[in-house]
Image (spheres, rainbow, N blue to C red):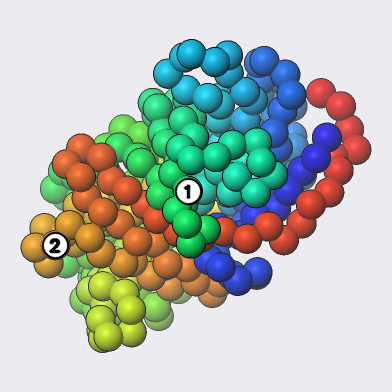
Amino acid sequence: MRIRIVDAFTDRPFTGNPAAVLLLDSDAFPDAGRLQEIAREMNLSETAFAHPLPPGGTADWALRWFTPATEVDMCGHATLATAHVLHTTGAANGTVRFAARCGILTATAHPDGSLALDFPTAPLTPAAAPPGLTAALGAEPLSVLDTGEHIGDLLVELDDEATVRGLAPDLVAVAACSRRGIIVTAAAEDPARGYDFVSRGFFPRVGIDEDPVTGSAHTALAPFWSARFGRDELTGLQASARTGLVRTALRGDRTLLTGSAVTVVDGELLTTF
């Protein structure tokens, strides 16, 4: 079976967020335990599995995502990676519809090669900082918000870009502070550099200490910063070691996440289900 590793939210290899993608030729998913074993073997933030659906339905492909530790409800970068594989191999063109645990998601190809994902906007609710959050991050939050059911993170605003970039959190303590993880963010120090805000994402509860570029987090970052800046279209830089850019467009209860992707590995999985 073909397996590909795609760097998402970047146009350069070895940056952005790598995801493994397997396009299955069956009409159903294999046992979840087997999918989890493959994701653990790949040891990337996410491994995406997709199989085609019968024509005429509400979606074209069924899609699931697994971290090395668990299945998740929503993943942006692995959806982008899957759409990239479908378009670059000729298995799809135009807009692709995915049926996932969080609902119907779409990915639309642009002439420049980028892809726009249509995801549900995260419902943001002000939250009290959990005990130990400041110590876990090593920084004092300006505000804390809950990101809702499908994401399950805390969105934490910090003082400035330098604080976000300089964090060295206690990951054991971070795991005790939220259902999935913590997204930290601040306004860009200099928007002339091509981005409006920065973020980082820490998800030790699901086996990801720091995620290089988290698409799903931007469904929360988009409404948060759009309200601050008074603009619906923004660009976020995830300031991990690999870095990546996510262009966001707030459309009410939907958020468009646009980025590029590049395939860096195309190989064969030498096992069976």
Left or right: 15 as drawn, with respect to 231: right
**Residue beneath disc 1:** 109
- The residue furthest right is 270
Give me the residue at 33% from left, 66% from top. 236
Which tag, 2 or 1, sits closer to the chain's start? 1
In this view, the residue in front, 248 or 190, is 248
Residue at position x 40%, y 27% in the image: 104
Does 100 sit above or below residue 176? above
Work out whether 71 lies above or below 213: above
Residue at 48% across / 62% down in the picture?
112
Can residue 57 be seen in the rendering of this structure? yes
Classify mark 1: residues with Cα within 10 Å, few (<14), some (14-19) or many (20+). Answer: many
Q: With 253 as the anchor, is 16 left or right in this view? A: right
**CA separation in Å, label 2 and label 1:** 24 Å
Q: Residue 163 in the image: x percent, y percent?
A: 32, 79
- The image quarter containing residue 196 is bottom left
Query: In the rendering, at what x and y percent does residue 149 appear?
Result: 31, 33
Q: Does residue 66 appear left or right of residue 255 in this picture?
A: right
Q: Is residue 34 above or below residue 80?
A: above
In the rendered structure, find residue 194 and report the number of the disc placed on it: none
Tally of marks = 2
Residue type at mark 2: give it.
Arg
Q: Which residue is mark 2?
A: 231
In the rendered view, tell whether residue 83 sits above or below residue 230: above
